[in-house]
Image (cartoon, rainbow, N blue to C red):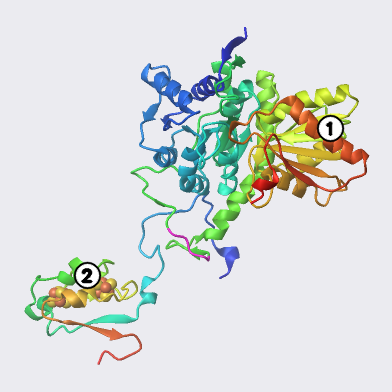
């Protein structure tokens, strides 16, 4: 019988982690992630989870503990938010460069300054180029399911995975969640096998300085230089497309829930006005699409679940019938535009699809975004299209952007 | 290098095992080399295991505690610490390319 419980996003995440049976958890509490760290420490303390909970003085150390534990064969977990994630930044590169399958929840929150505890996705977007896989969840069911898939993906590819979900909007909001059966999770997720096990019997220096060139070691084995090691990470990221899709499909086969793999689609088949986004804002856009459909505007949503590796082909495929694209995002590259806008535009380059793209920055620092406001943005884009306007546009939704603020 | 016949490193992450020469022939970098005057060197002149401060101080561990004292010039980086520490000043640093003199 299905085990359905009413849970916050953080509670769902904690249960997901428990089901994956990590050996080591190291996390430093930070709003809105704190509840997740607290529940996991309670599981360990109460003997519900047989893991080592390593208490650390900050996030840099939290990830360092996971990196070290992963190197000696432990399945590891950490979680953070916002400035805590920024504090980990150096070790994010280190985990990816060492090819260690650490799984981390990022409970998305705006970054200071100015100080904010509320949701946006600037924290994880700013970690885009660290070599981690990034998966964004729409609701609490997707959080628990994605964590299980994340371990499968990470350990298949030896690439660390971030499972991102919106702070408060998901982390502190209760929803019904179907808890996967522990035995079935055990069957789905094989034990972690390290690519290199560091033991006292086989001492090694890991990640010592590499030279710009390749060179033989004392045994005459030709060793890769820095650039080859980096190429191997990029090649594995390219392979990740298929692995993420397989994790999704195999999971759907066992547990009956399909979250879309890399890109999920909502009423996309004949949609001419397509919204895109990641996480809960993209879920909100499905309600906006319904509102517009009632008015006769053929709207749909192509939601990006996997942000890195970027699903270039899957996104272009989902946008096949689109005549205009509205990209909703809770983070941007200052001095250019929303990160997702740039990536989607690049995905369309070289395809026959030449459509106007509206870059919408929304919901920064917890600013509310309602479905009807998303629908308004979509309706404006639709009107422009009907009026024959083909240019791209940028706007900050629900934000005062008057003349006196123009720098 | 003929790469076809070379065994390749298939490691997923960058690693090495502790081995002599793992970081290359570090003697290549040397500008000055230590030259021992064995008439002055205590173990050589007295034929007794004594002193060996050069062995103790050498940061590369390339000095052999032997009579006579020997330095592995493949890995000596020419830092001159041995010459600085030698009590009877038995070691001179000579610029590479110049005669021991
Ligand atoms: S420090 Fe000088 S005297 Fe002592 S063993 Fe070395 S070379 Fe000889
Ligand atoms: S101390 Fe310096 S100069 Fe002397 S042998 Fe060692 S590496 Fe060479």
Position of A278 with respect to B32 (left or right) is right
Position of A209 with respect to A325 (left or right) is left
Q: Quick one: SS at disc 2?
A: strand
- Determine the chain carrying the residue at label 1: A
Coordinates of residue A181 in the picture (x, y in percent): 57, 15
Position of B67 with respect to A297 (left or right) is left
Q: Which residue is mark 1?
A: A379
Q: Quadrant of residue B30?
A: bottom left
Coordinates of residue A327 in the picture (x, y in percent): 74, 39
- Determine the chain carrying the residue at label 2: B
Q: Quick one: SS at disc 1?
A: helix
Q: Which residues are magenta?
A: A209-213
Please name the residue shown 55% across and 47% down the image: A130
Q: Is residue A357 above or below residue A293?
A: below
Q: Nearer the viewer, residue A319 or A363?
A: A363
Residue B64, disc? 2
Q: How far is mark 2 from mark 1, CA to CA?
A: 82 Å
The answer, for residue A265, to whether it is visible in the render is no
Coordinates of residue B26 in the picture (x, y in percent): 37, 71
Q: Are marks 2 and 1 in contact (CB under 8 Å)?
A: no
Residue A210 located within the stretch drawn in magenta: yes
- Same chain for marks 2 and 1? no
């Amino acid at each position: 019988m299905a085990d359905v419980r009413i849970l916050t996003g953080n509670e769902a995440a904690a249960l997901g982690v428990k089901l994956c049976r990590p050996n080591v958890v190291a996390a430093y509490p930070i709003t809105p992630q704190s509840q997740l760290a607290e529940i996991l420490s309670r599981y360990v303390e109460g003997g519900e989870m047989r893991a080592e909970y390593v208490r650390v003085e900050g996030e840099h150390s939290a990830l360092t503990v996971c990196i070290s534990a992963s190197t000696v064969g432990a399945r590891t977990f950490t979680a953070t938010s916002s400035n805590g994630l920024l504090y980990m930044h150096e070790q994010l590169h280190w985990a990816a460069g060492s090819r260690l399958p650490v799984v981390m929840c990022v409970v998305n929150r705006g970054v200071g300054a100015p100080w904010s505890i509320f949701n946006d996705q600037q924290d994880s977007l700013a970690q885009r180029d660290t070599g981690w896989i990034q998966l964004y969840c729409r609701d609490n069911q997707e959080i628990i399911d994605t964590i299980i898939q994340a371990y499968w993906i990470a350990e298949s590819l030896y690439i660390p995975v971030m499972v991102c979900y919106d702070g408060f909007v998901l982390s502190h909001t209760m929803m019904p969640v179907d808890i996967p059966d522990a035995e079935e999770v055990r069957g789905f997720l094989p034990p972690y096998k390290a690519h290199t096990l560091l033991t006292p019997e086989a001492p090694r220096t890991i990640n010592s300085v590499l030279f710009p060139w390749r060179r033989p070691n004392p045994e005459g084995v030709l060793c890769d230089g820095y650039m080859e090691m980096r190429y191997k990470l990029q090649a594995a990221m390219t392979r990740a497309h298929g692995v993420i899709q397989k994790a999704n499909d195999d999971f759907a086969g066992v547990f009956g829930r399909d979250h879309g793999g890399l890109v999920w689609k909502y009423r996309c088949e004949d949609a001419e006005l397509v919204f895109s986004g990641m996480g809960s804002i993209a879920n909100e856009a499905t309600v906006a699409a319904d509102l517009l459909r009632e008015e006769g505007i053929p709207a749909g949503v192509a939601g990006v679940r996997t942000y890195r590796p970027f699903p270039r082909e899957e996104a272009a495929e989902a946008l096949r019938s689109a005549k205009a694209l509205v990209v909703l995002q809770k983070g941007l590259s200052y001095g250019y535009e929303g990160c997702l806008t740039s990536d989607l535009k690049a995905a369309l380059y070289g395809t026959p699809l030449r459509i106007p793209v509206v870059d919408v920055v929304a919901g920064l620092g917890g600013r509310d975004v309602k479905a009807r406001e998303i629908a308004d943005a979509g309706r404006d884009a639709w009107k422009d299209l009907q009026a024959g306007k083909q240019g791209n546009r940028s706007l900050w939704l629900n934000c005062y952007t008057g003349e006196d603020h123009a720098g | 290098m003929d790469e076809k016949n070379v065994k390749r490193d298939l490691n997923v992450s960058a690693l090495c095992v502790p081995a002599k020469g793992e970081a290359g022939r570090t003697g290549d970098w040397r500008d000055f080399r230590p030259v021992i005057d064995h008439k002055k060197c205590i173990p050589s002149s007295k034929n007794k295991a004594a002193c060996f401060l050069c062995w103790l101080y050498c940061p590369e561990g390339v000095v052999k505690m032997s009579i006579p004292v020997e330095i592995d010039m493949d890995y000596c980086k020419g830092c001159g610490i041995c010459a600085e520490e030698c009590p009877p000043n038995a070691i001179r640093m000579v610029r590479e390319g110049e005669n021991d003199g």
